[in-house]
């Protein structure tokens, strides 16, 4: 049952990156959109993220619950030593959701709309930035559980070149996913070309930020290149992601919206496989060679068994409801395209 729980954990992280990432990316795209195209981007974004934006954080909640119940040592270590970026990320989620609701449903259009827009776009950038910083910190080897001062215990573990670089790479991935999803949300050729250009810009940004991550790893003496390219699974995953990116660029102008969305999701999945496979079952690498493992630091067997069954039974109810939610919104948009 332990491996069932681990599969659910990895899948929840992936789905949060794919769905929540595209959700955050919509705000990032809007942040870097000119005033002239702002209204177009915002209107298209509502239609694109409407079906899932309220349900996206379900995957984050599932991830947190799995760690809290199934791997308390891992949960405790991360929530203590990374509590600052975790707090910023959670505040960003709250601010973003609140601003999205108020700017969309506020009956009075006044100067507050400008404030809502700024909160939404900037929190859309800050949230995945700190999510990526947390992910980078987990494998950076900077978390010091034996620290004797505030900076070493609560700052140095995440405020470093590598973790911040992973944060900006995560931001670029979110923007890339959102731009790909937005391409298929308009029938206007001029608008479609606008979002295609955004998709190209964000894919270039992702390549640049990804390169910076490798530079940061080299500077910080983190063997990232060996982790990814030193094994067959990582190497094949990165090659598959690269080939799918080439194919995606080729299909961008050919209105193959469903295929390019699948390719974008496939690329992110391959990247996640490449970066997590080599560490398994280690999920957190600590300073001075220590680590936290999903196998060695699990909860008691009875707890894992109960958690596994709860996840299996819960998915039977949650997944059909989620698919129906997406179907309902897509049907609504089809009949009411405005």
Image (tube, rainbow, N blue to C red):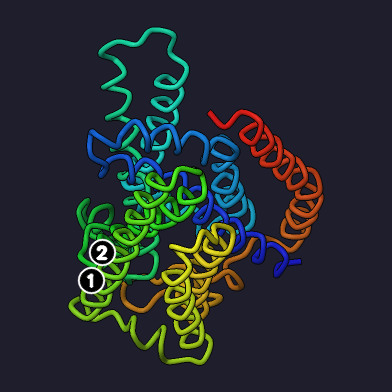
Position of 161 relative to 82 (above/below): below
Q: Are marks 1 and 2 in contact (CB under 8 Å)?
A: yes
Marks 1/2: CA–CA distance: 6 Å
Q: Residue sitting at 57 percent across and 64 percent down?
A: 259
Q: Position of residue 213 (x, y in %)?
A: 27, 71
Q: Nearer the viewer, residue 54 or 335?
A: 335
- Please report the residue visible at 46 percent of the width from the left and 88 percent of the height from the top: 235
Q: Secondary structure at mark 1?
A: helix
Q: In the shown orientation, is residue 269 left or right of residue 317?
A: left
The label on residue 28 is none
Image coordinates of residue 165 in percent, x first then y, are 26, 64
**Residue 333 coordinates in the image, percent (x, y):** 61, 34
Q: Is residue 144 visible?
A: no
Rendered view: 105 above or below 47: above
Q: Which tag, 1 or 2, sits closer to the chain's start?
A: 2
Is residue 125 rendered to the left or right of residue 2?
Answer: left
Rendered image quadrant of residue 214: bottom left
Quadrant in which the N terminus appears: bottom right
**Element at badge 2?**
helix
Query: In this figure, which residue is indicated by the disc labeled 1?
Result: 212
Badge 2 crowding class, 10 Å Cα cut-off, few under 14, some 14 to 19, many 20 or more, is many
- Residue under the image location 44 percent in, 68 percent down: 284
Q: Determine crowd level at label 1: few under 14, some 14-19, many 20+ residues with C-alpha closer than 10 A.
A: some
**Which residue is identified by label 2?**
165
Q: Residue furthest top?
A: 108
């Amino acid at each position: 049952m332990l491996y069932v729980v681990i599969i659910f954990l990895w899948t929840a992280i992936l789905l949060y990156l794919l769905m929540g990432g595209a959700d955050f990316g919509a705000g990032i795209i809007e942040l870097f959109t000119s005033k002239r195209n702002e209204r177009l981007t915002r209107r298209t974004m509502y239609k694109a993220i409407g079906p899932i934006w309220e349900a996206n954080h379900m995957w984050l909640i599932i991830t947190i619950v799995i760690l809290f119940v199934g791997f308390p040592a891992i949960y405790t270590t991360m929530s203590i030593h990374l509590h600052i970026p975790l707090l910023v990320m959670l505040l960003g989620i709250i601010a973003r959701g609140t601003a999205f609701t108020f700017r969309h449903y506020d009956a009075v259009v006044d100067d507050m709309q400008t404030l809502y827009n700024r909160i939404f776009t900037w929190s859309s950038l800050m949230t995945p930035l700190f999510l990526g910083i947390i992910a980078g910190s987990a494998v950076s080897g900077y978390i010091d559980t034996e620290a004797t001062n505030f900076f070493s215990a609560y700052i140095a573990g995440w405020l470093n070149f590598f973790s911040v670089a992973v944060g900006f790479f995560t931001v670029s991935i979110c923007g890339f996913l959102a731009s790909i999803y937005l391409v298929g949300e308009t029938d206007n050729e001029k608008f479609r070309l606008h979002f295609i250009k955004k998709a190209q810009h964000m894919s270039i940004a992702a390549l640049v930020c990804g390169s910076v991550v490798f530079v940061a790893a080299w500077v910080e003496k983190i063997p990232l290149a060996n982790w990814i390219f030193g094994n067959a699974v990582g190497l094949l995953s990165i090659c598959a992601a690269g080939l799918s990116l080439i194919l995606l660029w080729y299909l961008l102008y050919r209105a193959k919206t469903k295929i390019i969305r699948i390719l974008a999701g496939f690329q992110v999945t391959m990247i996640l496989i490449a970066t997590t496979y080599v560490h398994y079952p280690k999920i957190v690498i600590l300073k001075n060679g220590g680590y936290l493992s999903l196998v060695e630091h699990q909860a008691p067997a009875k707890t894992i068994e109960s958690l596994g069954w709860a996840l299996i039974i819960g998915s039977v109810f949650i997944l059909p409801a989620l698919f129906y939610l997406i179907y309902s919104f897509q049907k609504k948009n089809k009949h009411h395209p405005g």
